[in-house]
Image: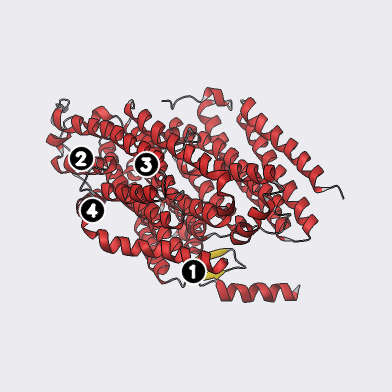
Amino acid sequence: MNGFASGLMEALLRDSAFILPQLFLAGLGTLMLWPGDLLFHKGEKHKWAPVTGAILIVVLALVFRTPEGTGFSGMYRVDGLTKGFQILSILGALGAVALSQRLLNALKEQTVEYYALILFSLSGMLFLCGAVDFVSFYFSLELMAICIYILVAYLRKQERGVEAGLKYFLLGAFSSGLLLYGISLLFAATGGKTTNFAEMGQLLPVVSQSNTLLVGAGVLMVLVGLGFKVAAVPFHMWSPDAYEGAPTPITAFMATAPKAASLAAFIRVFQTALPGVADQWMLPLGYVAAASMILGNVAAIKQQSMKRLLAYSSIAHVGYMLLGVMCGPEGAQATWLYMATYLVMNFGAFAIVIHLQGTGEGERIEDFRGLKDRHPFLAFAMMVFLLSLAGIPPLVGFFGKFYLFQMAVTQGHITLVTIAFLTSVVSAFYYLGVVNQMYFKDAPALAEGAEPEATGMATTVIVTVACVLVLLGTGFAKPLLEWAGGIGSEKKASQVALR
Amino acid sequence: MPSPNAVLIISFLLFSTGVAGILIRRNALVILMCAELMLNAANLNFIAFARHSGSVGGQAFALMVMGFAAAEVAVGLAIVVALYRRKATVQVDDINLLKG
């Protein structure tokens, strides 16, 4: 027992540098709940928002300083891929906290738990980005998901929120059962020897000769479980409901941060643990990607609700990003780049939706009629974000798409890229539909003496920054690509080292 | 000790029961129980094959899954209770506000 305790202590002291950001997040999140909650009285809980923001910025700095390497008996790995996606997750959380203020203040629903749950969920995401073992992978995924179930149902006095929470929870529980069973089948296929991604990557091609059924079923179930988490078709049915029912800042959060972390896990699982059995998953993953692009874009056309439209568009964008997952190690940087651009555009669009919601509109697409007269700047920014989501050059969304499609073509996924290209033309149709509403339809008559409400500081800052980034992002293509290149090349180096 | 293949069959039966229950039953609480059944089917595999190969990793995994299942149930029940307070029902067919 003493040997075990001292071994544990030694491992913790040696490896805790790798998980310092997560320790910081989880530790402070716990302290916030108690005794931190006693610090501010009932009416002043909104003061937790700047505190949380400060914590997130410190975590961002910590992530940059984290040393690279593998720790905790091969459970957790810090490399370019880990850091890249961790940064995206943190930015997503930061945006969500900033955007939450208005809504929570208006509803008088400010609590310390809201912020603590975002921190806990984020620590799950940070772990997930670096998980290189099915044990750490599964538990970080669930830590992330469980906190988000609660956040979706956070406005528990609103029927819609609770309903969305329950739907998301039941399907999430189902998918995590599938995922775990898939992992257990893969574990069984290796003869119960290992759950480590790299070791499995070596064992699976060997055992799949004799245990074809076991390996095939395991791989498919892992694919289905992960597909649920990133909301890829046909495992997407929870996502429009959860997006619509959740508090809008949490919708923006769900569309970006957990997606970035899950995509990092997607890349790790399929490129480290299962590359040897690629013939088992390449085709199904291709179908999932194609179905996501087609259904996401087609279903978005007939939506009346802005949040549902963005939900379906996010399903379509996941389809594009899965294309990157299929492209091998080089695809990781294309996926990262796409996710980074998507994060910026998406947060910009959601900031505007949330602002309009504050004045009781913005929920339906019709509410955007004549926005150019009421809020010229917001209408212009919204147009920029939507055009960028549609991938129209020279905006940054085009750059992300172009790079990803080019990568996929060089890897020989011609059919998929054709589908992706055609569906992004379809997507332009419904994005432009919103632009049409904003610029060419007359606004409904304002109520007597009603003034368009001034934009709050958080909204202005986020919209301006996102708008500038989207407009000028392509100009920074070269440094961004170099930075993203680090994600792919270190990945390659790590794979070489494992063989 | 039973052969690993026998365990695989039992765990598959358990898993199928869970999946069938989730797809067929309409009561949120029963669906929750069926999800637990799926987790336990996976646990059975982990324990049997860890025992088979003599590694402790799989057994530790199963233990932690039990902890996770408890956390999941706690959150799930809280959401079901919140829903019951709003609508006085736990049937999933009755929650149909969000559509499209």
Q: Amino acid at mark 4?
A: Val
Q: Can see residue A472?
A: yes
Q: Work out whether residue A109 can be spotted.
A: no
Residue hosting label 2: A383
Pick the front one: A116 or A314: A314
Q: Disc 4 vs disc 2: which is toward the camera?
A: 2
User: CB under 8 Å between callouts 4 and 2?
Assistant: no
**Residue where numbered disc 4 is placed:** A461
Chain letter of disc 4 in the image: A
**Share a chain, discs 1 and 4?**
yes
Q: Earlier in the sequence, mark 4 or mark 3?
A: 3
User: What distance separates the C-alpha of mark 3 from that of mark 2?
Assistant: 26 Å
Sequence-wise, the earlier of marks 1 and 3 is 1
Name the residue carrying label 3.
A417
On residue A32, the disc is none
Q: Chain of mark 3?
A: A
Q: Callout 4: helix, strand or loop?
A: helix
Seen in the picture, residue B58 relative to A109 is either above or below; the reply is below
